[in-house]
Image (cartoon, rainbow, N blue to C red):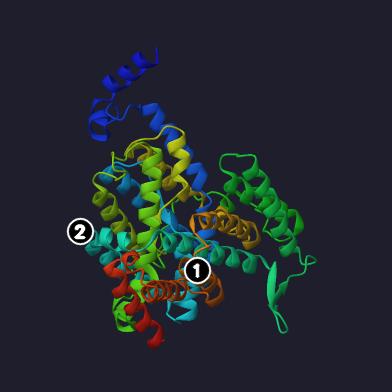
Amino acid sequence: MLETEMKQTYVENGFLDRYFKLSQRETSLKTEVVAGLTTFIAMAYLIFVIPGQFLIAAGIPQASATAATILSTAVATLLMGIYANLPIAMGSGLGLGAVFTFIMVGSMGLSWQTALGAVFISGVLFFILAITNITKAVIEAIPTLLKSAIGVGLGLFIAYIGFKGAGIIVPAPGTILTLGSLKQPSVLLAVIGLIITSLLMAKNIKGAFLLGILATTIIGMFMGVAKVPTSMGDIISFVPPMPTDSLGQLDIGAAVGYGLISIIFTITIVDLFDNIGTLIAISGKAGLLDENNNLPDINKALLAGSAATMIGGLFGSCTVTSYIESAAGVAAGGKTGLTSVTTGILFLATLFLTPLAGLVPGAATAPVLIIIGALMIGEIVHIDFTDFTNALPAFLTIILMPLTCSIVEGMAFGFIAFTLLKLVTGRTEEIHPLMYALSVIFAVHLYMK
């Protein structure tokens, strides 16, 4: 019966079957649409988190920040589906949002326009690296333990931002940081949101992040922390907004003037890791890898990723990257780009709900960052801490990212330590030749700060 139904679907949708290879990948139109809806529900929380926690903090006006986030996500996801034919959704990255706001605009002191220029340049660099196959060489040169350490360190950094944004941790003269006061309504609301979202995650509820944000926002309205809507205009916009304040406002000249080396290590490398890791992981779950666990035509996906980064810079959003939440759609049966096309169209539809984003307080989105940090720290199990030549580089990478509020600094110390320790202990066979070059570049970067 199922086989007959699938064959009928292929006959009725000849073009879609041929273009997205539905029958070849043993899937159907219905399955792909349901998978796309599942992915959308799993990652719709970014509509609130990216503007609320990052873009607005960087200085981008709220309406434009929300519209830019939605448009970047929708266009990039459609591109991945149509061009690369993969069930992988893309969106403004949380880790890369932290880099954009707290490192580039915060630590480096760049304007958000200059930071957007840097995002665009990183997309161009990403494109060059992908089309010349340098990307693959760089990824293969970095040892697995450091790749895992980068993920863990980034997770801690994101969690730190969540705790700080929620007011759960606050500056203290004697101890640098201390626990915030639960007597503050916004802090109490963040803790309530953390509990609610955690329970939803523990129950494996689809769309746990989105539901947690909405539930926390409603509770916040009763607590006086969140604004109570007074009209339909506070929830729905019948005229889709455009990112008028951020569209095309990127300052490429100022970004180049600041220094390409800093931009490469601040955005491009992190973007590469995000994309490569997610592409391989999700494609593997979808059964799209070959016998050597490689993704055929991976360059198409990487080129789509590089274009997505440039799109983010143009619209006025932080770097766009592949989203691990795509796994939800794959688990629902998604195997082709039609899944991504469905997700992209649904994101476009949310442009009509942009006023809703203005009602969501930071206390409702901060718990998502904390939980994502907890999920990312799981990569630590892949690191062998019994070998000191592995333990110290991994530790430095992990601990210095949140302590210095810089992903680059953590990577720099980790890469240099790995190369030096392996070199002095005579274990040069564990050092890829490119690691020497990367370590030298990182050393120069640290010296020049």
Q: Residue at x 59, y 56 (%)?
A: 374
- Element carrying mark 2: helix
- Where is residue 183? Give x, y as percent: 80, 66
Along the polypeptide, which appears first: circle 1 or circle 2? Answer: 2
Q: Is residue 134 left or right of residue 371?
A: left
Do we see residue 238 in this rendering? Answer: no
Image quadrant in which you'd find residue 173: bottom right
Image quadrant in which you'd find residue 127: bottom left
* Quarter of the picture holding the N terminus: top left
Q: Residue at x 56, y 64 (%)?
A: 156
Image quadrant in which you'd find residue 378: bottom right
- Element carrying mark 1: helix
Q: Residue at x 56, y 43 (%)?
A: 207
* Quarter of the picture holding the C terminus: bottom left
Read off the residue under disc 1.
388
**Amino acid type at image mark 1:** Phe
- Where is residue 300? Give x, y as percent: 24, 49
